[in-house]
Amino acid sequence: MDNYAVIGSPIAHSRSPTIHHMFAEDLGHEIAYKKLEADEKSFEEHVESFFTKGGKGLNVTLPFKKQAFSMSDNLSSNAKECGAVNTLSFSEDGRISGESTDGIGLIEDLKSNEVVIEDKSILIVGSGGTAQSIIPQLVTNGAQQISLSNRTMANAISLKEQYIHLLDITCLEGGLINRNFDIVINTTSAHLEGTLPEINPVAIQNSVCYDVNYSYGETIFQKWSAENGAKKSIQGWGMLVEQAAESFYIWRGIRPKTREIIDRLSSEPEN
Ligand code: NDP
């Protein structure tokens, strides 16, 4: 049986084992997928030990995506662009390959919600790891214009500079935004504090709003956007499952079906 795991800290809440076991069951594959808790010092040791013992693939979550990038011997062009990876594979020649599937997951979910990216103006709220990993994919898929707003402006500016060769990103004060966008993506973790990022409702008038966060029932941002002028409000279960499907594909060469699993996960807290 092939062994996989997700490594992060904290890791107890991760839904990745459930999702990958659902994929495997649907496809008739036998896999084992567990959670690994690490800290900054033990991360590399855990990864090396997992692969040396025959592990086939690892998902990497907070806060180790940059460390995983540094450990990778081979990087996809997308991963090189992002500077962070969430999927590690162990090649037969003993080398570690890294890919970032978060952006691909978001794009797949936008497509399945019939949201067109090409030629659209996009506001990304937040400038952390998720914003960093979705920008290259939004550009590849034809976004006409990307703006960033973030609680800490310096972090938005630093992200703008990382991608200056791809696109001229505009940094905006959320509360002072005076125009609307076709698509508004909330990548902040403000919901963990039960709050919303500061953003003028003008920004979401008639927009498609996408919250990368997910919950049972509406997320705080989803509810706020639906009540304040968005034409469509989506939350991030689909992105979660689609990025996992992309990892599964990298490891096992077949892309699992996702629709039913997204519906099941988002409606059954005990799964
Ligand atoms: P980071 O810690 O890298 O970034 C967090 C961002 O949120 C920063 O821009 C930070 O701003 C901002 N922020 C935090 N608290 C607040 C607040 N109270 N008000 C306004 N802004 C705030 O996290 P990630 O980007 O890795 O993850 C963000 C969220 O996305 C997480 O909740 C995670 O669970 C979710 N996620 C979902 C995925 C999916 O597949 N659906 C995939 C990956 C992540 P500042 O710069 O000022 O600190």
Image (cartoon, rainbow, N blue to C red):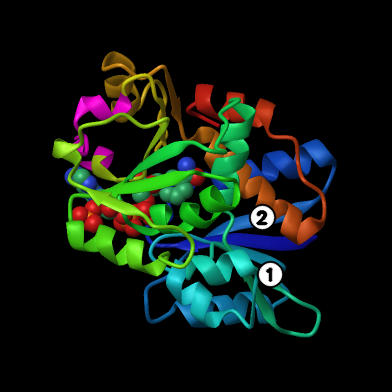
The yes-or-no answer for disc 2 within 8 Å of ligand 1 is no
Residue 252 spot, x, y in % from top left: 79, 57
At label 2, the amino acid type is Ser
Placement of 99 over or under 34, stated as above or below: below
Placement of 92 over or under 28, stated as above or below: below
Question: What span is in magenta?
Answer: 191-204
The disc label shown at residue 89, or none: 1
Q: Quadrant of the C terminus?
A: top right
Farthest residue to the left: give it. 176
Earlier residue among tags 2 and 1? 1
Residue shown at 77% from the left, 39% from the top: 25
Residue 37 spot, x, y in % from top left: 44, 65
* Residue 13 in sight in this render: no
| Residue corresponding to mark 2 | 247
Position of residue 164 in the picture relative to residue 76 (left or right): left
Position of residue 177 in the picture relative to residue 117 (left or right): left
Res. 99 image quadrant:
bottom right
Residue nearest the viewer, comparing 112 with 191: 112
Residue 82 spot, x, y in % from top left: 49, 65
